[in-house]
Each structure stands twice: as structure tokens, then as C-alpha cells.
Amino acid sequence: MDANTKKKVLISIIAVCTAVAIIITVVNILSGSGGYGAKGSMQVLCTNEDCGKDFLADRKKVRQHLVDTGRAAMGAVVIVCPECGQESGLPAIKCGECGEVFLPDYQSDEPPDTCPSCGHSPQQTK
């Protein structure tokens, strides 16, 4: 196998692993596992630069919206922000230490639930 083919294979493997990680996280968020907010709700962060509001969304309503819009099959979770009215809300995490609301970072070497403000992660042992 030449170097160019190896590079393509490695990029494909990385892309598939990233997609699987995102799908697993979305399933965990929507199913209520993983500590992503109170039972029956999920933490959401609006990614609209003019808004940035964080809020809790009802998991059942989000799930139904995904089914109704056909996004459930794609694994795409985009939620209408109650503040700005745009479909710019994404599943987020609220830090258990400092209360910062942030989006999971799958590009970092740290666990995706590592708080960018204080560095806390429920996955890291103390």
C-alpha cells in the first residue's frame, strides 16, 4: 500500500471514529444518561453569535422534533433557541464544578466533556 492510500485510509478511519463518537454522545444526551442535565431535560447552548443563551430543553420534545423533521436518521440535533428563535441550539454540557455551559470538544486530546473554563471533567479521576 502506497503512502497516499495509507493516508486516505487513516483519514477515513478518523472520520468514522469521530462520527461514531458524536452519534454515541447524541444518543446519550437524548436518552438521559451521562449526567447532561436534569432527568427529562437536556442542556443546550445557542451558537448564534448574537445570542449565546444556554437553556434546558425537554428531551421528549427534542426527540419528537428530530423525528418530525427527519433529522433523527441523520443524527443531527439542532434545537430552536427560545431567546432568538433560530435553529442554532446544540446539545451542551454544564460543568459540575464552575457552572460553565459549553459544547463538547471532540478535537481535543482531553475528554470531550472537559470544561474549557476550569478543566473539570466527570471522566477524569481525582
Image (tube, rainbow, N blue to C red):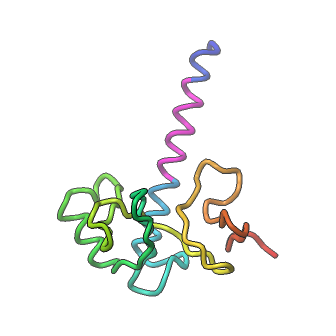
Q: Is residue 102 left or right of residue 60?
A: right
Residue occupying image coordinates x 54% and y 75%: 34
Quadrant in the picture for the N terminus: top right
| 14 in magenta | yes
- Looking at the image, the residue that sits furthest to the front is 50
Q: How far from the left and from the top, in percent, is residue 28?
A: 47, 70
Is 5 above or below relative to 120? above
**Which residue is located at x 29 percent, y 60 percent?**
87
Most extreme residue toward the left is 68
Q: Residue at x 55, y 27 (%)?
A: 9
Q: Percent position (x, y) of residue 44? A: 43, 70
Relative to 88, is 31 above or below? below
Magenta segment: does it hold 50?
Answer: no
Q: Is residue 86 above or below residue 3?
A: below
**Spot occupied by residue 78 in the image (x, y as percentages of width and height):** 33, 60
Where is residue 64 shown, x and y percent of the image?
23, 71
In the image, which residues are magenta?
8-20
* Residue that extends furthest to the top in the rendered view of this protein: 2
**Prevailing SS of the magenta stretch:** helix
Q: Quadrant of residue 75?
A: bottom left
Single out the residue that lies furthest toward the right: 126
Q: Quadrant of residue 110?
A: bottom right
Taking the spot 67% from the left edge, 74% from the top edge, the residue there is: 122
